[in-house]
Image (tube, rainbow, N blue to C red):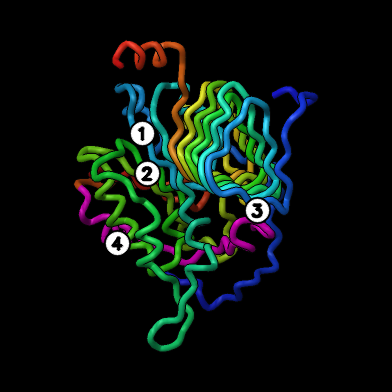
Amino acid sequence: MKFFRSSSATSTQSTPQSSTRLSRRSSGLAEVMKLLGSEESLWVLDLGATSPTNIRYFTEKGHKIYSEDLIEASSDPSLAITDEQGKPALDSRRFLAENLTHPAARFDIILCWNLADYMDESLVKPVVGKLWSVLKPGGLLLAFFHMKESGPDAIYYRYHIVGNDVLEMQPVERRSNSRNGTVSLRLQRVFNNRNIENLFRDFASIKFFLGRDNIREVLVVR
Amino acid sequence: MEAQKEFALIGKSVVIKGELSGSEDIYIDGQVDGSIELKGNNLTVGPNGQVKANVNAKGVVVQGKLEGNIRASERAELRKSAIAVGDISTQRLAIEDGAYFKGRVDIETEANKSGAKANS
């Protein structure tokens, strides 16, 4: 696994305008849509930056959606603590007590997008463990991972579902003067295939889709 | 929501704890902790508003911060500066890009409304 933590947190890279949207095809999404099209009133958990498009997309099809932006939630300044060595850390226990507080096996589909790439290291494994517990047996989890060519300043996107296998990617602006002050949206690490398999080892199966844009799509079945 | 209609204003420096109910539209730019019942009327949480309450109204517009469940019989709207934590149940929902929302969305259609009545 390649970490980017040694890089400066105050990147000078300019974030593209948030109004700019890139379109990309998603084979993983196409698989998710097969399930969505075959059953009614499914429960979907969207863990990316809030997407009105996704909320509309699922509710119009009669499904139920729960939206929970975990990157934003993990950047709450009140979660900052110091560990036993006096180093800055994140209160992962409190984060997990306040987020993903859903009944077991509630969701049929979980959309993680790039969550694991941008989340604090201390949260990644516990969050995946919680996702396993809130996903129904046989349920699908879709996650995206950057490939090693991606640098630490890889843009963090809001993913909008606009078709059965089409996504629009909208750069998420660093928030300032908002809920949590300035939110750092830096790529924390790059997982290789072995890391990803280990991360989801409690799940029943895992399928990789390689994209041309340095993104690996991973579809996991509980 | 009708922009010209008169409303009761809860200003920036006002803090209310308890149940807020009424039969006119309300604009909250202050702080409210409790519950809000405005059946048949609209609630707007202004950019400085901080509300911790379950809300029941005809229309709800959030520009500031609202923690609690929203039940809007007609329409709910989260503007780009909105921070809304709680479930939303309404017939029509509009969320602007940039709004933060954590919660479940239930879009009530006439079909599922009548179904709920039949079951009750």
Q: Which residue is mark 3?
A: A173
Residue under the point 46% across and 32% down: B105
Q: Amino acid at mark 2?
A: Leu
Range shown magenta: A174-203
In the displayed image of the protein, which residue is found farthest to the bottom? Answer: A85
> Mark 1 to mark 4: distance in Å?
23 Å
Q: Which residue is mark 1?
A: A32
Q: Which residue is mark 2?
A: A142
Q: Amino acid at mark 4?
A: Arg
> Mark 2 to mark 4: distance in Å?
17 Å
Q: Does residue A78 sit above or below A97 in this rendering?
A: below
Q: Which residue is mark 4?
A: A194
Closer to the chain start, of discs 2 and 1, is 1
The C terminus of chain B, quarter of image: top left
Q: Nearer the viewer, mark 2 or mark 3?
A: 3
> Mark 2 to mark 1: distance in Å?
8 Å
